Amino acid sequence: MQVRQVHDIEYHLLPGTARMTTDIVIERDGVVTVRPPARMTPEQIDQTVLSKRMWIYRSLAEWRELNGGRINREWVSGESFMYLGSSYRLELVPEQDEPLKLKDGRFCLLKSVVTELGTDGASKAFATFYADKGQPRLARRVAYFAPKVGVAAGRVEVKDLGYRWASCLKDGDLHFHWKCLMAPLTIIDYIVAHELCHMLHRDHSSAFWNEVDKVLPDYQRRKEWLRVRGVELDL
């Protein structure tokens, strides 16, 4: 991946593809990524980015506004954590047989995890919980939507994907960020359908969105929820 700059816009240039259009995306970390047709020269790509500069400026401004509300965790009893779209209070407990449990409507976290391992340990306990609970659930949703999209999916894995919600590999394997499990079920279904449609179209062209629309006619509402509220799905 190459980092380029045109005027005051810095962007990450991704490998070109056989697509006919240039895909410009503001990633969850605020980085501008550009995936162009393979036939385009770097100078042509710069010109394309420059022609879209007003859209990029507006999108980056929205990203900064949305990310101004990121949560700063203190890891104390009473804090709220999302799971499948519902909010659960945290309770630090002196002992239990697992680091983290969802029990009696609360997230019960071993107090020693926080005192001995700190923020990293507490975050890891939640990430492990979401990944363990999420893998079978996401596998079921992939199995449900794959025939509707008309594809055969590969393995489903739940892991830390940095600033991406999910990814579709060329071999058909699907990877999902464990943070997806914080979202409501309708949003999880959108993420699943989105990635399955990438098995038909690797870009975000009109043809791609048409496929998503066939499966989820209200996908735009779900997409907007994720754009606006996705920042809240964090530790």
Image (cartoon, rainbow, N blue to C red):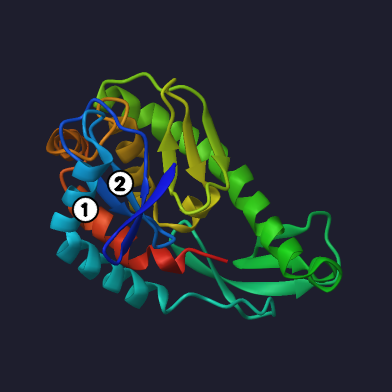
Circle nearer the N terminus (2, 1) = 2
Q: Which residue is rendered at x = 83% and y = 55% of the image?
A: 97
Q: What type is the residue that disc 2 sits on?
A: Val
Q: Is residue 141 left or right of residue 213?
A: right
Quadrant in which residue 73 is drawn? bottom right
In-front residue for pair 29/144:
29
**Badge 2 vs badge 1, beta-carbon distance below 8 Å:** yes
Q: Which residue is rendered at x = 31% and y = 20% of the image?
A: 151
**Vertical comparison of 118 with 207: above or below:** below
**Vertical comparison of 170 with 82: above or below:** above
Q: Where, quadrant-wise, is the C terminus in this rendering? A: bottom right
Residue of label 1 = 49
**Vertical comparison of 143 with 70: above or below:** above
Q: What type is the residue that disc 1 sits on?
A: Val
Residue of label 2 = 34
Q: Which residue is rendered at x = 43% and y = 79% of the image?
A: 69
In-front residue for pair 33/100:
33
Secondary structure at badge 1 equals: helix
Q: Is residue 6 left or right of residue 100?
A: left
Q: Which residue is rendered at x = 47% and y = 51% of the image?
A: 180
Q: Is residue 214 left or right of residue 13?
A: left
Quadrant in which residue 121 is drawn? bottom right
Q: How many marks?
A: 2
In-front residue for pair 71/110:
71
In-front residue for pair 53/154:
53
